[in-house]
Amino acid sequence: MTMTTKHHKVSFSIFSAKVFQAKCYSLIALSLLIFSFSSHADNIASINTLSNVTKMLQDKHGFIWLSSQQGLTRLDGSNNITFSLNNQEWPLPYSWINDISLIDDKLLIASERDGLWLFDTNNGVAKKLAVDIPRQSHYHSVWFKDQYYINAPNKLYRFNPSTKTTQLLDDNIAIKHLVHNKEQLYVANSDGLYQLQDDQLQQILSEPITALTALSDAVIAITANKIYRLSNEGDISSIKHNEKLYALTKAFASDNFFTVSNAGKISKYNGTSLLPLSHNYGNSTPVRLTSLFHDASGGLWLISSHGVEQLNETYVTNHKVIFDIPINANEITLFDNEIIIGSYGAGLQNFLKPVFKQDINSAFTKNGLKIFDLLEINKDLYIASYDGLWRYGNSTKQVQKLDVVADKLILKLEHKNNLLYIATNYYGLYIYDLSTEKIIKHLDIIDGLPSTEIIDVLPLDSGKLWIASSNNISIYQPSLNKIITLTTPNKSKVISFVYADNKIFASTLGDGILVFNQQGGLLAQLSKGHSFTEMLLINDTIWASGKPGLYRISPKNYQVTMIENSQQYSFVSSMLVKDDTLYAIHYSGVLALNLSAKKQFNPNVIISKTTISGKAYLLNKTIEIASGNDVITLDLASLDYRPGLAKEYQYRINNNQWQKINNNQLTLTGLASGRYNIEIMATNSLGQWSDIIAYTEIDVAYPWYWTIELRIFYAVLVLFIVLLTSWLLFLRTKSIKHIHTLLKDDMRNYGRLMNTLQRNLQLTATSLANNDVEQGKQLIEKSILVLKDNINSQEPDNLAGKTLALAIPFLADYVQSKYEVKLHFTLDDKVDKLKYELRADIYKVIFEAIMSAIFKSEAQNFSLSLKEVKQKLWLTVNSDKNSFSQLNSKINFDLASYTIRQITTKHQASLNIFANDDGSSQLVISVPLMALN
């Protein structure tokens, strides 16, 4: 086990430092105690005002219910609701209740004047059962094997809810206890214990029964001198006792049980062997109890005519230590592996074992008896006092004053690397070399300290020294001889430092605990508003003493947990660990805490009440409101009934960031229309966050024009408009495309006709210029024929279902006869085995390329090659003129260029055009294809 020990007190004036300190501590402790536990005190106080509490139980949610003459009361750890005849908000038709028992999420209520009722714990609605019993005064009632059993005065009835019939089982029996488990029903009175067998009560014990409770497979019955266990199978065992026992209850979630005597002695037993078990409840107030109850958090509730008392297990032991001094503010430390006490006025004192002789304090001066700090170094004890520095020698067994800082008031001692750091009240910090026995450094205001009152120091391995001076924190760097004072949010004094998880934790007397990185940057502020004194690091966990209470702090996630039952003590400062026990000194003694791990209690976190625009509902379900103007108030509860810290709550909406809640109420208003998922977390009474998260949903209605039905209508309408618009656009596009096709055909035919006439006329002009009249005449006649043929003929611009072997020769004859152009071709015999679509596209490319070349140049001869080589179809067209250059242009292109490029892109083909030096040109197109079939 590793630990870091620090102890200190704070003085505020030279003359009466300790007195003033103690008074301030007491006032702060009292105010914090009142603040921290006011809600719990109010809770208990309100329970104590209930007269004649008859029964207490806990439902499946974790709420505790009490029946009394004032009605039915629900506890949630923060607020109480009493259902009664006098409560208009939470009404019942009656107030006086004799008994309650749990049936799933309902309570079976036996009333004094109004018969038998079923109360729904989810909504607070009570319904009377139509039981045919002459007297409406019912004392006990239970639900056993799908039927109700009722104790009316001196009679036992059974009511069957299925047949609506009531049966009298016994007409002359005074019933004091009526209990059951899954298999058996028992009745007890001053004559003995009875078991229901074949609709008859059979006596199985003939002694007066003072207390009775049922276990899962047995019943525990107490008589004047014995505790009996009777199993469902009929086995009986017992142990003797010599106490007056009238209170008995089953332990929560187990078959063990508790008894409480009239003298206040609490005992715990094994429910099977009847062997006594250890517990940590101590003793109760001596009083005769009428009922006893054990809840899920471990609380033991004692009910008597005087009211309700709650006890909780305590894992701490208080050693009372009081000296004959004005202020019992003392320090503890380990010396020679034993705990010793340094008092404020009585010098050195022994604790559990004697270490010092009786005359040990005779050498002290009067002010030297006022001890502020103790520190063991090299088997000697160094003592910081009101009158300077003293040393107790382990070898000499004597106290000697050291002339180091004269008679200065010393608040704190710290030791590291053979250096003793001496923190004074008015003279700054001294660094004393234990080897040379000389002061090697004195830090004062002139060196940069904001105050000369030094409360704590923390030397780090890096060489830096953290200094707490009054309400300031400074860092001294010896290598630079420089002091830097940090900007911190606290206004109260800084009391203690501890180094953990590469961070520095600083406790304050009113502003919680500040967390810094090693450079002095503030990382967090824990438990703001609380007062802490000493801090101690044990096995990577920080322990802190407070005003009031002891706390455990995780350096990694900053979880602050109060130690149960430590809240009644206000701690001075120093703590230490010995034999796996933490010792912390307070104003009336030393508290010892066993450090063995204890399981965390995770209470149910629940929405105990929902208020919507002034109307309240129990619990919570999906909330539906008409608009965001409605105000929703959620009363939250963490169902841990132990006294301790005020519970903290936080919430988030739709998986956003968690937000803190100032109290146990969450109010929401102004919500926009939509659905909201709300999660709520809470701490238990020790400040630990429960693993259970409360959940609710809020549906804010949309305006009338944005309802679900209208939104569906809007969606259908928008879809219809989109479809209609798309259909109209399609028709328009189709029309435009058709018009473009007609225009393209007309323009192409007109263009080719004009090109033919222009070419023939140019040739005619050439012939006439050469006096070749006959040739000119023939050309003119051809032009006239072209004009005539154009009207009745069509170009072979598509494959028209034919093979390439037929279409290409036909195209060659066509261009020969019509344009006086020769087309030579070479065709691979495999090409007609290709798919028709590809063949048609290849023919279209050939036609468009040759026709474009004829009209764009004066070419007279073309040669065409079409063959398949290495899984590619190669089309090569040669011209005796530069006929294909226009196909390369992406800006100035005609319809033939567009068509050819579209087809090559479609088949992922490559297109290349070559211009030769002799003025000829070549078009090469390669089309990738699978192997020919």
Image (cartoon, rainbow, N blue to C red):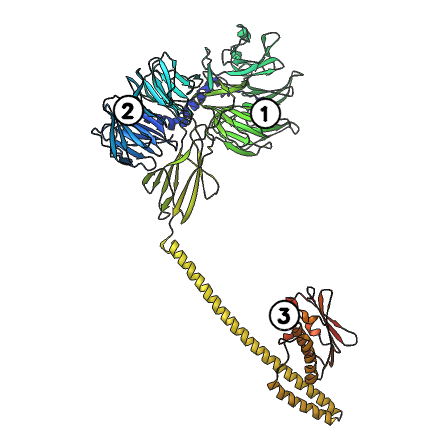
- Image coordinates of residue 799 in percent, x first then y, are 64, 76
| Residue 344 vertical placement versus 891 (above, below) | above
Q: Is residue 645 above or below residue 204?
A: below
Kind of residue at badge 3 = Glu
**447 and 368: which is toward the camera:** 368
Give the percent coordinates (x, y) of residue 240: 38, 12
Task: Give 195 or 848, whichever is nearer the viewer.
Answer: 195
Q: Does residue 489 appear in the picture of this structure? A: no
Q: Distance from label 2 to label 3 (Cα)?
A: 99 Å
Q: Label 3's element? A: helix
Classify mark 1: residues with Cα within 10 Å, few (<14), some (14-19) or many (20+): many
Give the quadrant of residue 108: top left
Q: Is the Cβ of the residue at disc 3 closer than 8 Å to that at disc 1?
A: no
Classed neighbour count for the residue bearing mark 2: other residues with Cα under 10 Å, few (<14), some (14–19), many (≥20): few
Residue position marked by numbered label 3 in the rendering: 837
Q: Nearer the viewer, mark 3 or mark 1?
A: 3
Q: Position of residue 200 (x, y in %)?
A: 28, 24
Whether residue 487 sits left or right of residue 302 in the image: it is right
Q: Which residue is mark 2?
A: 200
* Residue at x-position 69% and y-position 85%: 817
Residue 59 lies, with reference to residue 15, above or below; the image says below
Amino acid type, residue under disc 1 in the picture = Leu
Provide residue 116's location: percent of width, then percent of height. 26, 31
Query: Which residue position holds label 1?
Result: 458
The numbered mark at residue 840 is: none
Q: Secondary structure at mark 2?
A: strand
User: Which quadrant holds residue 886?
Assistant: bottom right
- For marks 2 and 1, the one nearer the N-term is 2
Along the polypeptide, which appears first: circle 3 or circle 1? 1
